[in-house]
């Protein structure tokens, strides 16, 4: 389906698994989205988050994914990762 601007508005959703890690990194960018969070803010105490900000948080999320836990879902538009949703207890 095309939007009024001529873009496809069809989204596909897939769980974040090891084989989709590179898509997660592409979406979050070199710095891990906002301030090196790598979506770990909700999973850690404030102190743990601050201590791991950046590479530490990326590695922590990677460990979750490698454990087989699905921490969230990626949204794709035309095969490109465009969105992320995760819910986790603090």
Image (tube, helix red, strand yellow):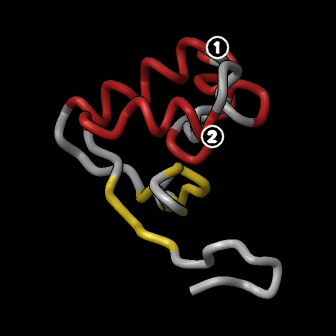
**Residue 23 or residue 62, whichever sits in front:** 23
View extreme (front): residue:
6
Q: Residue at x 56, y 32 (%)?
A: 26
Q: Is residue 15 left or right of residue 54?
A: left
Q: Position of residue 40 (x, y in %)?
A: 55, 37
Question: In the picture shown, does residue 12 fall above or below 56?
Answer: below
Q: Which mark is residue 22?
A: none
- Mark 1 Cα-neighbour bin, 10 Å: few <14, some 14–19, many ≥20: few
Q: Which residue is mark 1?
A: 51
Q: Position of residue 73 (x, y in %)?
A: 42, 59
Q: Residue at x 31, y 34 (%)?
A: 64
Quadrant of the rendered image containing residue 38: top right
Question: In the picture shown, does residue 34 fall above or below 89?
Answer: above
Q: Position of residue 72 (x, y in %)?
A: 41, 55
Question: In the picture shown, does residue 32 fall above or below 83?
Answer: above
N-term mark: 1 or 2 = 2
Q: Is residue 34 left or right of residue 14?
A: right
* Number of numbered discs: 2
Quadrant of the rendered image containing residue 54: top right
Q: Position of residue 78 (x, y in %)?
A: 51, 60
Cα–Cα gap, marks 1 and 2: 11 Å
View extreme (right): residue:
5
**Residue 26 or residue 42, whichever sits in front:** 26
Q: Which residue is mark 2?
A: 41
**Residue 90 or residue 21, whichever sits in front:** 21
Q: Residue at x 58, y 41 (%)?
A: 39
Q: Secondary structure at mark 1?
A: helix
């Amino acid at each position: 389906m095309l939007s009024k601007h001529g873009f496809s508005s069809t989204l596909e959703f897939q769980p974040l698994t090891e084989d989709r890690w590179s898509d997660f990194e592409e979406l979050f960018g070199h710095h891990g989205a906002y301030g090196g969070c790598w979506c770990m803010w909700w999973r850690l105490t404030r102190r743990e988050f601050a201590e791991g900000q950046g590479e530490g948080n990326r590695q922590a999320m990677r460990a979750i994914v490698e454990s087989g836990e699905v921490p969230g879902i990626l949204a794709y538009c035309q095969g490109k990762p465009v969105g992320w949703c995760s819910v986790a207890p603090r």
